[in-house]
Image (spheres, grey):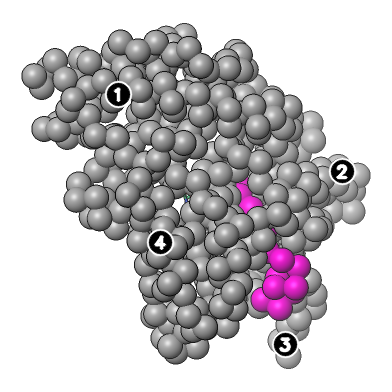
């Protein structure tokens, strides 16, 4: 069995109380475990600090408002936004994409306009566009993949036309781990006058993200994949785009003045945050960003890349294993074993205390293109180390023995 030699251990495991000794948690691409610092921030938020935001005239509420807005500033700094007001708190990437679809796209797309997606998109970066295409008469195109299951930007370049108003792509694929050349994607999109939305769900926990350097127009991510809480995520959009977008949900907190004669709306980001927000979620996200930045995204990427290299090497030692995705995938290894359903792989690995994901990973068009119903997927985080790769390889050895 291959033994990992190249990883630079981060020694972060001790920060995660929910990972017992001997459990190889390899499902971070679905959701990350939480460090104590995040758990503490959430507990403090609901303990002595708890109050609503934006409305209270009493001190506790004013303090909580400051903390909530400090979280927004932290997000802005983390992703290189020009201003905190460009960062809208949403429930997660799914809600962020739906917001852009129902607000920006629904008002900007005309019959015959085109939206460019790719074959490897998560359903949350497909279905909202299908819904808005149906509503507006826009048409969806799908960029193909390279032989190692990354988005084929050469092919996409040849498909783009002035009718394309939006290109929406995963920054990092949740199935193949392929990293998009986002800068090139932005140049291609802008070359035909289209906007670029990046789904940063899998990128933000693994790569340094600077939206200004990437050159995109919209960027979305979920807090829970970044070691933060569920129910909180971020939509970033260029200030001038957000300023021109109509609200998509009405209610408290998003208004300027309400009367039965008519209502005027608050400027962004409040215009897009109707109702009482996930206040403590924002505080947890703030703590999660502090946590990953203290380690450093470059160190996290190097660590996960070494684990991916070791896992790919170990798995390629089994004749019956097919690996998907590029060699340099970011923290994610998808694979199949001939004659074994991925769910059986997952169940046998679970008996060996190795937690992986098995399924279509909310990417059914990609599974169809690969000609398989599902894959097994091991994905890494800051808490993983060489022992987890070895446990995975031992588990796969057992699977191949059982299925002979
Ligand atoms: N896009 C990608 C690439 C993802 O991996 C996920 C989560 N699996 C999503 C979007 C949706 O994220 P959420 O369910 O947190 O909204």
Are discs 3 and 4 less than 8 Å apart at CB?
Answer: no
Determine the CA span between mark 1 and mark 3: 63 Å
Magenta stretch: residue 344 in it?
no
Does the beta carbon at disc 1 come under 8 Å from ligand 1?
Answer: no
Q: Which mark, residue 262?
A: 3
Instruction: Point out residue 334 in the picture as x, y percentages from the top left corner.
Output: 33, 36
| Foreground residue among 66 and 129 | 129
Determine the CA span between mark 3 and mark 4: 41 Å
Determine the CA span between mark 4 and mark 2: 44 Å
Disc nearer the start of the sequence (3/4): 4
Front: mark 3 or 4: 4
Determine the CA span between mark 1 and mark 2: 52 Å
Q: Name the residue under label 2.
A: 63
Front: mark 1 or 2: 1
Q: Which mark, residue 315?
A: 1
**What kind of element bears circle 3?**
strand
Disc nearer the start of the sequence (1/4): 4
- Image: 300 above or below 68: above
**180 sits to left or right of 26:** right
Disc nearer the start of the sequence (4/2): 2
Are discs 1 and 4 less than 8 Å apart at CB?
Answer: no
Crowding at mark 1 (Cα within 10 Å: few <14, some 14-19, many 20+): many
Crowding at mark 2 (Cα within 10 Å: few <14, some 14-19, many 20+): some
Residue 40 shows up from this direction: no
- Image: 73 above or below 319: below
Crowding at mark 4 (Cα within 10 Å: few <14, some 14-19, many 20+): many
**What kind of element bears circle 1?**
helix
What span is in magenta? 231-245
Disc nearer the start of the sequence (1/2): 2
Q: Mark 4 points at which residue?
A: 118
């Amino acid at each position: 069995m291959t033994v990992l030699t190249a990883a630079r251990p981060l020694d972060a495991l001790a920060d995660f109380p929910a990972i017992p000794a001997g459990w190889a948690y390899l499902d971070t691409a679905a959701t990350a475990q939480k460090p104590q610092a995040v758990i503490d921030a959430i507990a403090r938020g609901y303990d002595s600090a708890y109050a609503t935001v934006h409305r209270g005239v009493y001190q506790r509420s004013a303090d909580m408002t400051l903390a909530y807005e400090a979280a927004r500033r932290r997000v802005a700094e983390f992703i290189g936004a020009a201003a905190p007001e460009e960062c809208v708190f949403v429930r997660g990437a799914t809600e962020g994409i739906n917001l852009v679809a129902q607000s920006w796209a629904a008002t900007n797309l005309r019959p015959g306009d085109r939206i460019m997606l790719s074959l490897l998109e998560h359903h949350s970066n497909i279905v909202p566009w299908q819904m808005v295409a149906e509503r507006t008469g826009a048409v969806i195109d799908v960029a193909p993949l390279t032989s190692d299951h990354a988005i084929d930007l050469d092919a996409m370049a040849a498909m783009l036309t002035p009718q394309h108003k939006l290109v929406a792509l995963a920054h990092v694929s949740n199935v193949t781990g392929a990293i998009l050349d986002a800068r090139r994607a932005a140049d291609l999109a802008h070359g035909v006058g289209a906007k670029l939305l990046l789904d940063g769900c899998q990128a933000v926990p693994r790569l340094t993200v600077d939206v200004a350097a990437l050159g995109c127009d919209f960027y979305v991510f979920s807090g829970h994949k970044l070691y933060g809480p569920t129910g909180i995520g971020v939509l970033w959009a260029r200030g001038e785009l957000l300023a021109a977008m109509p609200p998509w949900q009405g209610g408290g907190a998003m208004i300027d003045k309400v009367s039965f004669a008519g209502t005027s709306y608050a400027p962004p980001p409040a215009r897009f945050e109707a109702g009482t927000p996930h206040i403590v979620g924002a505080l947890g996200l703030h703590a999660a960003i502090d946590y990953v930045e203290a380690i450093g995204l470059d160190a996290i990427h190097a660590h996960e890349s070494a684990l991916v290299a070791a896992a790919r090497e170990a798995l390629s030692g089994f004749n019956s294993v097919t690996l998907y995705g590029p060699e340099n995938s970011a923290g994610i290894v998808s694979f199949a074993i001939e004659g074994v359903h991925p769910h059986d792989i997952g169940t046998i690995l679970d008996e060996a205390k190795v937690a992986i994901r098995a399924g279509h990973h909310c990417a059914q068009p990609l599974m169809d293109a690969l000609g398989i119903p599902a894959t097994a997927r091991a994905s890494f985080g800051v808490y993983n180390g060489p022992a987890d790769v070895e446990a995975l390889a031992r588990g796969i050895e057992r699977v191949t023995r059982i299925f002979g």
